[in-house]
Amino acid sequence: MSAERLASVGIDMDEVELYGALHGLRLDQTCAAGLVHAVAGQRFGEVCDTLGVRGTVFVVGRTLGTSPAAVESVRLLHRSGHEVANHTWSHDYRLTRRAQASIEADVHEGAEAVRGVTGERPVGFRAPGYNMSAPLLGVLERAGYSYDSSILPSVPYYISRAAAIGMLALLGRRSASMTGNAMSCLAPSAPYCPSPAAFWRCGSASIVELPLTITPVGGMPFIGTFITAAPLRIVLRTLRGLSARPFLNIGIHGFDLLDATDGIPPVLLGRQPGLGVPAAEKMRRLAATLVRLKETHRLVTLAEAAAAYRRSSPSGEAP
């Protein structure tokens, strides 16, 4: 990266039915339709506006195609200066197992949905479930994306996800999620240009990979579930240990800013962690995290971070 320390906060606007699918539940797409965008999107915007921060919003094209509330939320965030990036059309957790033509169509339709709302082609991408593959990387390269932000190089996260999927299988429920490629755990924690054949290694791809941040001790994901549910003193202490890193990529989900009073289907209460923490407290913790981040880093969108990486490391080597 540049000599200046940079940080980005990205929010995945996955809607309620996708969380049901994670837990092996079949919720209709109309169930609490647009709730995450309308409520969590507004809360994210409020926190960012108060602090003068602009983030990156990853949106699912299918949601934009069915929910006027989602369209309005994304439009407002875009007008406020937030980057809007592609999170696919269908948010199929098993996208990387599909034929390449099907992958390409899903990515393209997601981008077109974003363009239909913002008037701009997205330059950034995040795969459902953080699951990357060589064919998917190739699709992004050919489509001219500036960056991908799908790599979460965390062994504990990989193990815990595999355990959760396995537990559901024992209970007779099939999660829509999958473990993905374990080689992601070996990827650099700093921005890099990946190898087209081995996306977890530095190489010659034209796209920049911006991995999500993991903690210095234990390699745990420094993501929204931790920020909004862990004691704030632990969050800030962890952030202190990250303060010397030249780039931090903080990923949260819209669901992280909801609580049990927001109209979430009862079947999800008790299954999804963190819903017992009041939304006001979650917003306070997110704001405190961003305030601390601003003391050591300049907060930028992921598109801006990718551009800074290209200026400082034209060879594609990880700094």
Image (cartoon, helix red, strand yellow):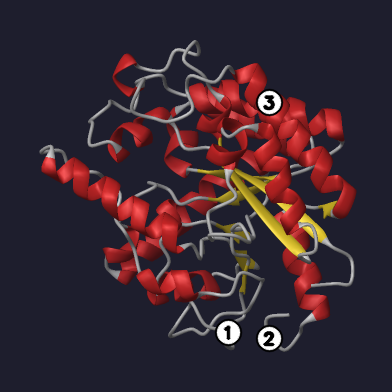
How packed is label 2: few (under 14 Cα within 10 Å), some, or many (20 or more)? some
User: From this viewpoint, is residue 42 visible?
Assistant: no
Dot 2 amino acid type: Glu
Name the quadrant containing residue 237: top right
Q: Is residue 49 above or below residue 118?
A: above
The numbered mark, 2 or 3, whose residue comes first in the sequence reads 3
Q: Is residue 234 above or below residue 36?
A: below
Q: Nearer the viewer, mark 1 or mark 3?
A: 3
Residue name at image x 68 percent, y 51 percent: 120
Element under disc 3: helix
Q: Position of residue 248 (x, y in %)?
A: 71, 58
Which quarter of the rendering shows the C terminus?
bottom right
| CA–CA distance in space, label 2 to label 3 | 37 Å
Q: Position of residue 208 (x, y in %)?
A: 64, 72
| CA–CA distance in space, label 2 to label 1 | 6 Å
> Mark 1 highlights which residue?
202
Q: Nearer the viewer, residue 110 or 222?
A: 222
Q: Nearer the viewer, mark 2 or mark 3?
A: 3
Whether tag 2 and tag 1 are in contact, CB under 8 A, the answer is: yes
How packed is label 3: few (under 14 Cα within 10 Å), some, or many (20 or more)? many
> Mark 2 highlights which residue?
317
> Mark 3 highlights which residue?
283
Residue name at image x 80 percent, y 47 percent: 293
The numbered mark, 2 or 1, whose residue comes first in the sequence reads 1
- Is residue 180 left or right of 208 when viewed as pictured? left
User: From this viewpoint, is residue 45 visible?
Assistant: yes
Element under disc 2: loop
Name the quadrant containing residue 101: bottom left
